[in-house]
Image: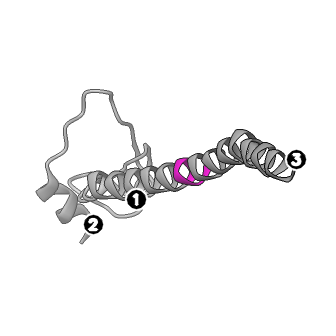
Amino acid sequence: MHIARRFIGLILILFFGLPTLFGIIWGTVAIVVLLAFGMGFKRQLSVNMHGIGESVAIMFPGRTTKPFEGFGIGSFIGCLQFDQVNPQRIRQVLL
């Protein structure tokens, strides 16, 4: 009778204990993998984004603050969608 109880106890441990242990291990591994994936994705995104925005000039239409090439102070300058700007001219205007 005593051996039967121990056998039943062993069966219950195997039946309920192993799936619980497997679930805990599976959940822990899943969290570690997801965190590692997220950190790797963040790092790669940072590497890929490096350099975007360097040497970019953003211009808005408005009024001039310095006289330049016949335009007096306060002259309105507008921008068209297809305007292409020569970077050398921008440096001349800003200096």
Q: Nearer the viewer, mark 1 or mark 3?
A: 3
Q: Earlier in the sequence, mark 2 or mark 3?
A: 3
Q: Which residue is mark 2?
A: 94
- How far, Cα to Cα, is label 2 from label 3? 98 Å
Q: Earlier in the sequence, mark 1 or mark 3?
A: 3
x and y percent of residue 83 in the render? 24, 33
**Could you say whether the residue bearing mark 2 is in a helix, strand or loop?**
helix
In the image, residue 29 lies in the stretch drawn in magenta? yes
**Looking at numbered disc 2 in the image, what kind of residue is underneath it?**
Leu
Q: Is residue 31 left or right of residue 20?
A: left
User: Measured along the vertical axis of the image, is residue 49 above or below residue 19?
Assistant: below
> Who's the residue at 37% across and 48% down the image?
59
**Looking at numbered disc 1 in the image, what kind of residue is underneath it?**
Ile
Residue lying furthest front: 1
> Who's the residue at 44% across and 58% down the image?
39
**Looking at numbered disc 3 in the image, what kind of residue is underneath it?**
Met
Q: Earlier in the sequence, mark 2 or mark 1?
A: 1
Q: Image quadrant of residue 28?
A: bottom right
Q: Image quadrant of residue 53?
A: bottom left
Magenta-tinted stretch: 27-31
User: Measured along the vertical axis of the image, is residue 43 above or below residue 84?
Assistant: below
Q: Which residue is mark 3?
A: 1
Q: Main secondary structure of the magenta part?
A: helix
x and y percent of residue 60 in the render? 43, 45
